[in-house]
Amino acid sequence: MTRRERLLATFQGKPVDRPAVNFYEIGGPQFDPRNPDRFNIYNDPSWRALIDLALAESDLLPLIAPRKRPTPRNPRQQYFKTEQFEQNGSRFTRTTLSVAGRTMTALTRRDPNLATTWQLQHLLKDVDDLRAYLQLPDEVFEYDAGDVSHLIAADRALGDRGIVMVDVPDPVCEAAMLLGSENFMLIGYTQPDLIEALLNKLAPHRLRVIEQVSAAFPQHPWRIYGPEFAAEPNLPPAHFRRFVLPFTGAMVRAIQRHGGWARLHCHGRVASALPVFVEMSADATDPLEPPPQGDVQLADVRACYGRDMALFGNIEASDIETMQEDTFEKLVAQTLRDGTSGPGRGFVLMPSAAPFSRTISPRTLRNYQTMVRLAQRG
């Protein structure tokens, strides 16, 4: 089988020649060692061998977001202002919102040696900010996403090495990023109706993007991220069901209407979330973290839910970077056994995330090589 055929068969629940192995984002378009930008960590020479390994040997699922542009009647510029500046070697982005007599500010920072964005200030800092945000006109959230030329081009460039995975947040993620995880949890627990009002504000426009892209770019996998903000221990299972099932479930159905497959990304404790994923007919889930980061064992998930969903995981990214090679080899071998034991829809050997620092150690590279070698052995 080609790598593309193997991944498609996994999502479809069809037989494969061996388990796929994926390095999460590694191999996507942002992993460009030729880009000289000092904020591009992937131009460090230590990254080259890992990127080459991903491109040559892994089953590629590059994560690419839809391309959105405001609709002609979107008045966003009347309410939001964004500025970017550099200070002390870091790159900052400040977003200011003025609505209902209030002014709110969000601030992020990007450092040159880490592929992550630090949220220094969240836009909505209390309930009063949230109530003001809800007064924004609905047109502020209207975007067109029908131009999928970048997705088509990326998919064509992949050839038989893999398939593009469209990457989108769910309304829970958008709400949590506006409020910060602590305030999202606090308000969600004490004033769930207010969080539900925010989700109802965000969801229709997110769903419109999903419907446009899935119609123009059908029969592709999607990653939906964000349910973890409402999962345990942040919020009780009843709140997870209330905030995730109707809104994220609608996204899953929109993707599937056009022959696509929805993979739900949820870090941490997912034991109580998995039945909800099955109820919304998700096609796959990741990263299924074991304790102490998570609360599930892969063999148990395979036995209980493996017929319903393809399983992606469950190697912790930190283990790739810190674990001795002989110990890591045993871990990967056991993960492959647990992920493929008994009947099931499919399994992909995958870490919980990709490295985000500028340098890749020799041990990290060797552990990725072990993942490829053992997966290819079948």
Image: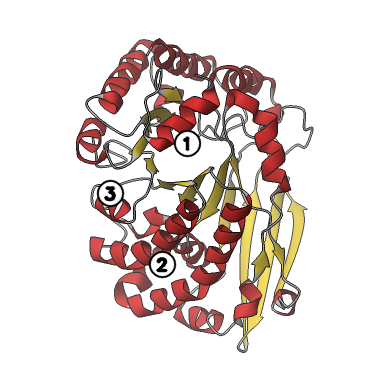
Q: Secondary structure at mark 2?
A: helix
Mark 2 vs mark 1: which is more N-terminal? 2
Q: Residues within 10 Å of mark 1 (few under 14, many from 20)?
A: some
| Residue name at image x 37 percent, y 14 percent | 378
Residue 274 is tagged as: 3
Q: Is residue 177 above or below residue 256?
A: below
Q: Is residue 263 above or below residue 100?
A: above
Q: Secondary structure at mark 3?
A: helix
Q: Is residue 85 left or right of residue 167?
A: right
| Residue name at image x 29 percent, y 63 percent | 241
What is the spatial separation of the Cα atoms under label 3 and label 1, in whole angstroms?
20 Å
Label 1 sits on what residue type?
Ala
**Percent of width and height locating residue 179:** 48, 68
Q: Disc 3 vs disc 2: which is toward the camera?
A: 3
Residue 184 is tagged as: 2
Along the viewing direction, whichever of 258 and 92 lies nearer the viewer:
258
Q: Is residue 274 visible?
A: yes
What is the spatial separation of the Cα atoms under label 3 and label 2, in whole angstroms?
21 Å
Q: Is residue 29 visible?
A: no
Along the viewing direction, whichever of 113 and 249 lies nearer the viewer:
249
- The residue that label 1 is drawn on is 353
Q: Is residue 206 left or right of residue 30?
A: left
| Residue name at image x 41 percent, y 31 percent | 10
Rendering colour mode: secondary structure
What is the spatial separation of the Cα atoms under label 2 and label 1, in whole angstroms?
24 Å
Mark 3 vs mark 1: which is more N-terminal? 3
Label 3 sits on what residue type?
Leu
